[in-house]
């Protein structure tokens, strides 16, 4: 009996170990199955994230690879665009030193014809100008010359500013001009340009202003002369001339929106600048707000000096911008600041500063004032 009992106890012990092992195996199998289910669900979530229709991994990996390729190509494309942009020539930018030179050339137009033809008019007759041709219009004048190997045109403004400003405020008669499609310009400006045009064209022809089969010219003007220069630019462009540079000072509104649009089309890529100074009343004229059937608009861009040159400048692209001369649109108040019209970028842009004999000064003053 004892022997039997010991054997029985040993068998029961071994059976317990086997059942325990089996139980452990069953628990492990359940845990493994759970883990496998979790893996499948995780894979399906990944494929769902990859926008795969099923849990087939090859399709998912293809989507991941395509996305990765796009991510790699994006910076390469950006670098290519940057390189291409760098290879394109930059647009011309405003050059203050250049503006000062043009202001002197614009101011020189107020000096006598004798001083201009001999190019002996004082500080406004800068170095490098030669072969000057003077053209006399109905009430003002202009001159053509060679400067730095290019042809130059400069237009004189009027000298009786008070009467001229008054006329600009009152008379607003527009006239159609065939120099650009559907354009209208101020009748006084167009009449004065037409009185100068034959002489200007003849002078440019005499100077032989052709460079590499391209007729090139630089243009400037002050006050009325600035308005004339704008009309001249469009007129010359229609004849095949290339306006290389143009700086205008104290320019009044010259034409309507069609004139402004055509001007921007021709010269809006750089090289032209309309410079204004503080409370210059002329740049506010003619006041379009007083016109019921026709609207004058400025050509752009505007470079505005609210003080001296050392105080810096601001550039604007819209007529009436409050960051530029548009902040001083009260013409009656501006009339107290006519001096702002007579000096630009530190240069006397009117009669002041002309070094010449008194008889030459008297001879250079027009016999009448243009009625605008």
Image (cartoon, rainbow, N blue to C red):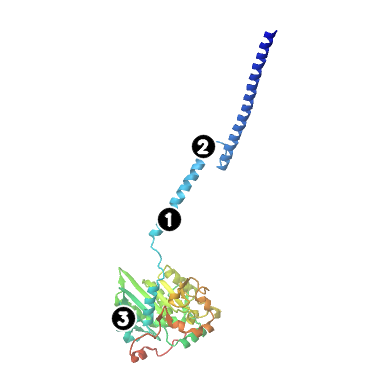
Q: Mark 2 Cα within 10 Å, few/some/many (few <14, many 20+)?
A: few
Instruction: Indicate the quadrant containing the N terminus: top left, top right, bottom left or bottom right.
Output: top right
**Residue 360: in sight, yes or no?**
yes
Residue at x 66%, y 17% (from the top left corner): 13
Which residue is nearer to you in this view: 179 or 51? Answer: 51
Q: Quadrant of residue 23?
A: top right
Q: From the image, tell me which residue sits under label 1.
A: 81
* Disc 1 secondary structure class: helix
Query: Measuring 63% from the left and 25% from the top, which residue is drawn there?
Result: 24
- Which residue is identified by label 3? 132
Is the residue marked by circle 1 packed among few (<14), some (14-19), or many (20+) residues within 10 Å?
Answer: few
The spot of residue 283 in percent (x, y) is 48, 79
Dot 2: element? helix
- Residue 86 appears at what percent x and percent y? 39, 59
Of callouts 1 and 2, the N-terminal one: 2
Residue found at the very far top of the displayed protein: 1
**Do the residues under discs 1 and 2 have CB atoms within 8 angstroms?**
no
Q: Which mark is residue 140?
A: none
Percent x, y of residue 230: 42, 76
Foreground mark, 3 or 1, reads: 1
Assess disc 3: are there few (<14), some (14-19) or many (≥20) residues with their C-alpha within 10 Å of its C-alpha. Answer: many
Q: CA distance from mark 3 to mark 2?
A: 82 Å
Q: Earlier in the sequence, mark 3 or mark 1?
A: 1
Work out whether 32 lies above or below 257. above
Residue that mark 2 sits on: 58
In three-dimensional space, the C-alpha distance between marks 3 and 1, rounded to whole angstroms, equals: 47 Å
| Left or right side of 27 for 351 | left
Among numbered discs 3 and 2, the one appearing first in the sequence: 2
Of circles 3 and 2, which is in front?
2
Q: CA distance from mark 1 to mark 2?
A: 34 Å
Question: Is the residue 319 above or below the residue 167 in the image?
Answer: above
- Name the quadrant containing residue 31: top right
């Amino acid at each position: 009996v004892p022997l039997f009992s010991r054997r029985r106890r040993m068998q029961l012990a071994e059976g317990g170990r086997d059942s325990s092992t089996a139980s452990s195996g069953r628990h492990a199998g359940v845990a493994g199955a759970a883990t496998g289910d979790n893996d499948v669900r995780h894979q399906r979530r990944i494929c769902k994230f990859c926008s795969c229709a099923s849990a087939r991994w090859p399709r998912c990996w293809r989507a991941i690879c395509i996305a990765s390729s796009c991510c790699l190509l994006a910076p390469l494309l950006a670098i290519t665009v940057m390189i291409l942009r760098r290879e394109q020539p930059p647009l011309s930018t405003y050059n203050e030193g250049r503006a000062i030179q043009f202001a002197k050339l614009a101011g020189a137009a107020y000096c006598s014809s004798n001083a201009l033809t001999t190019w002996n008019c004082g500080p406004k007759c800068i170095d490098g100008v030669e072969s000057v041709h003077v053209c006399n219009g109905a009430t003002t004048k202009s001159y053509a010359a060679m400067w730095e190997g290019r042809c130059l045109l400069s237009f004189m403004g009027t000298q009786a500013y008070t009467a001229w400003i008054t006329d600009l405020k009152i008379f607003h008669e527009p006239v159609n001009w065939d120099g650009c499609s559907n354009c209208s310009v101020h009748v006084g400006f167009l009449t004065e340009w037409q009185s100068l045009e034959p002489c200007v064209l003849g002078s440019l022809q005499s100077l032989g202003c052709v460079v590499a089969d391209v007729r090139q010219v630089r243009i400037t003007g002050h006050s009325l002369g600035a308005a004339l220069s704008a009309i001249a630019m469009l007129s010359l462009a229609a004849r095949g001339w290339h306006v290389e540079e143009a700086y205008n000072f104290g320019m009044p509104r010259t034409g309507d929106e069609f004139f402004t649009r055509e001007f921007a089309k021709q010269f809006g890529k750089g090289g032209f600048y309309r410079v204004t100074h503080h409370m210059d009343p002329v740049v506010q004229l003619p006041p379009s707000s007083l016109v019921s059937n026709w609207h004058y608009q400025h050509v752009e861009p505007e470079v505005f000096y609210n003080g001296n040159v050392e105080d810096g400048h601001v550039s604007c692209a819209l007529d009436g911008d409050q960051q530029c001369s548009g902040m001083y649109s009260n013409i009656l108040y501006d009339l107290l600041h006519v001096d702002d019209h007579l000096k630009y970028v530190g240069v006397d842009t009117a009669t002041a500063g002309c070094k010449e004999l008194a008889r030459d000064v008297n001879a250079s003053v027009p016999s009448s004032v243009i009625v605008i």
